[in-house]
């Protein structure tokens, strides 16, 4: 199995108030503290299947205007999604499956480029997005529990889509098992790894109680299993992947600030 990051934005930032303020309130945190931000989605090449996890921002999305009040900037676009995919050696017709963590446009923006791939996402999110067609697989998590998560669906050997409600009401995470490690593609359970270590929710959720439950489950899983945490909105995501860094919640790394 090979896992690769598809990088499209870099040199952004997010404020601590945005990344940490979901439960206690933004006023409890420091707006002058900023963490690095980016966008990268991921690809899993099993040898038999080429699987995308999320599909980036729509290519026509304008560059975001940023000022001192901006809570989250994705940064500068360094590549459109298909070019970044091509630079990794893949064409749209190579993709056999796509796993969607949730409905937001920065995770589903280029689904239209892959009409022949089977697209897996929770039934809730499929209905929210009004996705229909023979290639749409609305997942109902029929395969029971996966470790401490209650509901899962096996996609292929070693790759699972797992119910993880909160950020959206149909939110999922993906876990791939390889070489004794668990690679967790979590969408936006946290926006930056600092929030994972500090056990904080961002301000973006549809169900705060479920978001708390999901983050608790994620942290419990990480404590019990050697996990590489693959974020979408911080360069720590692709850095963790490149270094096969196993998360140790008791020993957070020193932050690199933008």
Image (cartoon, rainbow, N blue to C red):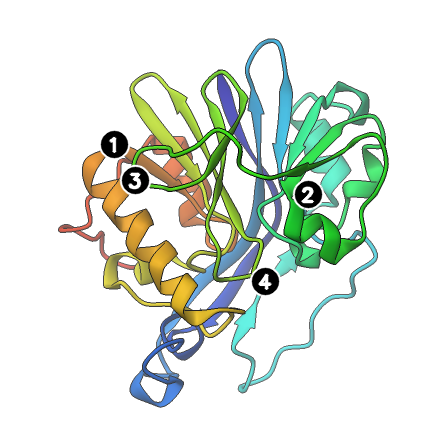
Q: Quadrant of the C terminus?
A: bottom left
Residue annotated with mark 4 = 74
Q: Earlier in the sequence, mark 4 or mark 2?
A: 2
The answer to whether mark 3 and mark 4 are in CB contact below 8 A is no
Question: Which is more foreground, mark 4 or mark 1?
Answer: 1
Q: Residues within 10 Å of mark 2 (few under 14, many from 20)?
A: many
Q: Residues within 10 Å of mark 4 (few under 14, many from 20)?
A: many
Q: Which residue, as the protein is rendered here, is positioned at the far bottom?
A: 27
How far is mark 4 from mark 1, CA to CA?
29 Å
How far is mark 3 from mark 1, CA to CA?
14 Å
Q: Earlier in the sequence, mark 3 or mark 2?
A: 2
How far is mark 2 from mark 1, CA to CA?
26 Å
Residue annotated with mark 2 = 55
Q: Secondary structure at mark 3?
A: loop
Residue annotated with mark 3 = 148
Question: On residue 226, which mark appears?
Answer: 1
Question: On residue 256, which mark appears?
Answer: none
């Amino acid at each position: 199995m090979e896992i690769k990051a598809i990088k499209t934005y870099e040199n952004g930032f997010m404020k601590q108030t945005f990344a940490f303020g979901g439960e206690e309130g933004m006023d409890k945190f420091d707006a002058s503290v900023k963490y690095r931000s980016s966008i990268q989605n991921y690809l899993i090449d099993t040898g038999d299947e080429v699987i995308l996890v999320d599909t980036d921002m729509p290519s026509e999305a304008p560059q975001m205007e940023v000022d001192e009040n901006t809570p989250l900037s994705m940064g500068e676009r360094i590549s459109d999604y298909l070019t970044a995919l091509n630079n990794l050696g893949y064409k749209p017709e190579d993709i056999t499956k796509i796993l969607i963590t949730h409905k937001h446009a920065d995770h589903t923006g280029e689904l239209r480029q892959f009409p022949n791939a089977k697209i897996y996402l929770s039934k809730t999110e499929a209905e929210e997005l009004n996705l229909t067609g023979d290639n749409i697989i609305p997942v109902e998590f029929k395969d029971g529990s996966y470790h401490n998560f209650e509901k899962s669906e096996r996609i292929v050997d070693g790759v699972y889509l797992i119910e993880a409600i909160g950020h959206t009401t149909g939110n999922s995470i993906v876990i791939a098992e390889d070489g004794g490690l668990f690679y967790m593609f979590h969408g936006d359970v946290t926006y930056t790894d600092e929030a994972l270590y500090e056990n904080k929710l961002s301000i973006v959720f549809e169900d705060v109680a479920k978001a708390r439950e999901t983050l608790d489950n994620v942290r419990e899983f990480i404590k019990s299993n050697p996990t590489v945490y693959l974020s979408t909105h911080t360069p720590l995501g692709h850095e963790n992947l490149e270094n096969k860094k196993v998360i140790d919640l008791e020993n957070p790394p020193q932050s690199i600030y933008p």
